[in-house]
Image (tube, rainbow, N blue to C red):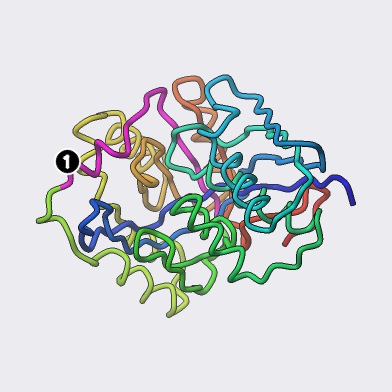
Amino acid sequence: MDEICLKAYAKINLTLDVVGRRADGYHLLQSVMQSIALCDLVKIRKGNGLRLAVDHPGVPADVHNTAWRAAELFLKRIGIQGGVEIDIDKQIPVAAGLGGGSADAAAVLVGLDRLYGTGLTPEELGDMAVAVGADVPFCLQGGTQLAEGIGEQLTPLPPVPGGWLVLVKPPVEVSTAQVYQKLKPGTFGTGSSQAFIDALVQGAPWARLAEKLGNVLESVTEELLPEVRLWKGRLLDGGALGTIMSGSGPTVVGIFPTLSEAQHFQGRWQGQAGIILTQPVGQGIGEANGGDR
């Protein structure tokens, strides 16, 4: 095998609690994370040296890209003399709180393991993943997981029910570092995550799970970007069972009970923001030819 093409699935946060802060400044989290069908396509082929091409002008194609760092780390740690050429077809919005860069990096690790037949264990791949970025371990495993620590400590959870997710990405950006810097210690706690997990384990439908959605960072991002509160309101008015901002934003997620209701919302507001319809999936990396990992 000299070439492989993989789907790198995006993620959303169904809950996000901050429980503390490490001495080095990193915040400690509890977050229920979910893979979704929205994905980038990552084509990897054997080559000489390291080359990365991305079809989005706002995404670097060098060491500042997590996919590049993942490839560099893999080749160095395994001691492979050959190289790799990587082409990324970006479908996941950039700087949106959807983990696109982390997903691409996870796909590179999986792809290189397969291309070079190194047969790494999930633990070995996971060690590389956390060295690249905090969300990369989740994107490697995917599905529905409780993420703790800085996001690298994962516990599998029962899958969420089927349903339709509407992602709204306002035409604005927010600095993740700035959001965390403005977060006050008084907001630390585990309220949303544990309540959501309890309901999920009991087999609750979305109508009940939607009541448990919660992201402590929303209060900060909404101050910086009023569009977040605006779109949450529009989603609820449009029939969403519940809404939540993913990560540090600015993407807002609405949970809809039916495809027709999700499509109606998309038709009503498309053009005023990036609006994407998607669904939960049970893995982090998939085969581009239709099979899943």
Asked where in the image residue 222 lies, by quadrant, the reply is: top left
Question: Residue at the location (37% across, 47% down)?
Answer: 247
Q: Nearer the viewer, residue 90 or 116?
A: 116
Question: Residue at the location (44% across, 78% down)?
Answer: 201
The answer to whether 250 appears left or right of 2 in the picture is left
Q: Secondary structure at mark 1?
A: helix
Q: Is residue 182 magenta?
A: yes
**Around disc 1, counting alpha carbons within 10 Å, would you say few (fewer than 14), some (14 to 19), or many (20 or more)?**
few
Farthest residue, direction left: 186
Question: Residue at the location (67% across, 48% down)?
Answer: 108
Disc 1 marks a residue whose amino acid type is: Lys
Residue on which disc 1 sits: 182
113 shown above or below 168 = below
Q: Nearer the viewer, residue 118 or 86?
A: 118
Total marks shown come to 1
Farthest residue, direction bottom: 202
Tell me where the magenta segment starts and ends, as one range: 163-183
Image coords of residue 123 (percent x, y): 58, 71
Q: Quadrant of the C terminus?
A: bottom right
Asked where in the image residue 284 lies, by quadrant, the reply is: bottom right
The answer to whether 251 appears left or right of 67 in the picture is left
Q: Is residue 11 magenta?
A: no
